[in-house]
Amino acid sequence: MSTPHRVKVALPEANSRGYEVLVGSGLFGSLASILSRFCPAHRYAVVTDDHVAELYAVRLSRMLHGAGYRTDVFAFTAGEEQKTRETWTLVTDAMMEAGCGRDTALIAFGGGVPGDLGGFVAATYMRGLPFVQVPTSLLAMIDASVGGKTGVDTPAGKNLVGAFHQPNCVIIDPELLSTLPEEHLRAGLAEAVKHGAIADAEYLAWIEQEADTLLAGDAQALSRLIVRSVEIKAEIVARDEKEVGPRKLLNFGHTIAHAIEALSGYSLLHGEAVAVGMVEEARIGERSGVTAPGTSARLRTILSRLGLPTSLPIDFSADDVIGRTRTDKKARNGRVEYALIQDVGTPVSREGRWGHPVADETVAEVLAGANGNR
Amino acid sequence: MSTPHRVKVALPEANSRGYEVLVGSGLFGSLASILSRFCPAHRYAVVTDDHVAELYAVRLSRMLHGAGYRTDVFAFTAGEEQKTRETWTLVTDAMMEAGCGRDTALIAFGGGVPGDLGGFVAATYMRGLPFVQVPTSLLAMIDASVGGKTGVDTPAGKNLVGAFHQPNCVIIDPELLSTLPEEHLRAGLAEAVKHGAIADAEYLAWIEQEADTLLAGDAQALSRLIVRSVEIKAEIVARDEKEVGPRKLLNFGHTIAHAIEALSGYSLLHGEAVAVGMVEEARIGERSGVTAPGTSARLRTILSRLGLPTSLPIDFSADDVIGRTRTDKKARNGRVEYALIQDVGTPVSREGRWGHPVADETVAEVLAGANGNR
């Protein structure tokens, strides 16, 4: 194992102690010593899903037992549809049954679902256990690893119940991506493109140039990508832990993405929806006169290189999409606001505000021509 | 309304902004203006139980509507057995249904159950809403108002799921106690006796002297009591937000209390169990040689004056009680620790540790003679 990269996540409220994201090939094999340093505990509860458990639970348990730690694995059925209060209840009760007390630390191990749900168990078990994240999907590595968001879905929508609960550290081993299905690797790359688009044009160019290497799963290239994405997200979140200011930037592409994800009944992967959302929101920005012409075309080229979709599924109507964005609106104070960019690498901020109200008609005009038929 | 007393709750971690507990007769009538100052929001969600709602919901809604605030009342069935994840789910979903977004602040209104459960809804709704507590029971006023503990019970035990979530402020109007059943008033006074016993002998003497006035529900005497109890608890919690050090002091009487509460199937009120627990734990301290002889007798006299029980229910065996305290132990690192006092008003601390491991045999000897037959 080479020396890991360490990205410090400093949080804006004096509140939070901050933590480190460790990135390195082979880091998973050093889990026990990392835990003893960053998250010492009498025993560990591993919360994961059955897919990840099948691939890695034996190895993980063996490592921790070998280091003398009592370790229990709590695996639930894989899938976003399991990210519910019911699964949270099942995991919590199983941990109670196993006698986990305040001397336990939790390891949220897996993709976004085990990460968010495991984090929410940690946030609420006996009013909070220390925890670490060990993400196994690219999306979880570069997105969920920073910001301390935990939670579950409810019938009313995604992530509507949860808590901010910062991990003691995040341990990222790109070698774990070797078992990730390729479409999930692509989907994760969409968030990396977003990081480039809102903050770093050079990074975006590098992703474009390295597209084939990244898609082939090269651990070194993926390490570089993860480190840079985590740095960008950490910089933004450090300025704004609870989403009142610049953190809104991270929503670039996401207003449309959330709408089409929901319309697809979540058959579209989040990253696929974000790819489409970024192109459409760049077009909305171009039409609104705040985004440089050609920006959406540039994003489309890069996303296509990565094998990601770049236009609205043909059977989605502009009206349906806009209807869904209005649901978002209701939940947040009465307006549909978009995070827009001036150009790749440069966000738009007007008088310190990072959300831009856009008229439904503008969105309708853009989306009307967006069903794959341009 | 006279000028309210304001007790500042400063929290130890730089983390928490701290908040104020406002205490004053008639304060409930000024709720709207207090909210506009301490917890401004576009709309308010009142979480309460059906008993409190029947008494006060119309008045409260009228006040807030009159001040121009959109206000919805979410009332669940009263009772400790409703303090569950299921009720938390019902309330959360009803608020979603009503369209409450991040522009909403929550008012946890009622005794301990609406306070803890409403607080937990606030802690987890869209990852956290601002909230205020408006307690209506004496116990909630002097105990739950300080410390930011929120949560619900699970089949494995009380308060096992929850979060630390600090309110924006706590609004205490002793006039609301006029509708509190007398046994609940007495039970609340047990916690005030505990505050005297662990921190302030003069306060304890004052409670003894004013026993009749307090039991008669005199709002002025109750105001003084609430202010002093909140001050004591705030001082202790300020040194130790998350229960690692001096906050353990607040557990005086509670190791035994939790055991007999559970054994009674929660038919004993918490304060009644605490009254018995304080006498027994003072006797345990006397027998262990750390508590001055006569301390348990002194507590017994005061608690009897307040009409509270002071000995173990006759049908409880020492073995059963000890068995239950061992369950506590399992959850917390392998030992039954007691918070003990040297004398009324003075806690025992050994080398900065506030928990005292006591051998089961000592507890057994004390409890064996404790079934009301001394």
Image (tube, coloured by chain):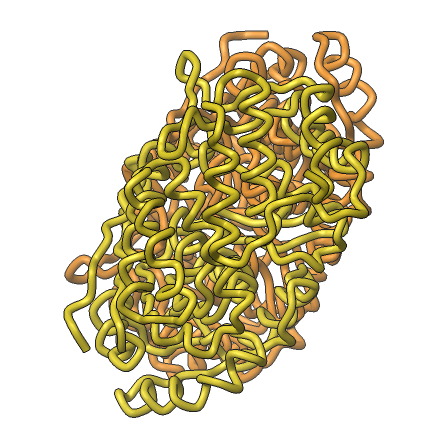
Chain colours: A orange, B yellow
Horizontal side, residue A73 vs residue A338: left or right: right
Q: Which quarter of the image is occupied by the N terminus of chain A?
A: top right
Q: Quadrant of residue B197?
A: top left
What residue is at 55 percent from the left and 17 percent from the top? A24
Residue in the picture at 72% in, 21% down: B360
Horizontal and vertical percent position of residue B222:
33, 64
Which one is in front, A306 or A133? A133
Report the label total.
0
Q: Is B210 situated left or right of A305 in this image? A: left
User: Where is residue A135, by image quadrant?
Assistant: top right
Q: Residue furthest front?
A: B374
Q: Is residue B134 above or below residue B71?
A: above
In the image: residue A12, left or right of residue B3: right
- Residue A372 visible? The answer is no
**Percent of width and height locating residue A86:** 74, 57
In this view, the residue in front, B97 or B167, is B167
Residue at position x 82%, y 39% in the image:
A50
Q: Is residue B243 left or right of residue A350?
A: right
Q: Indicate the position of residue A111 as horizontal and vertical percent values.
A: 66, 40
Q: Is B98 located above or below residue B85 in the figure?
A: below
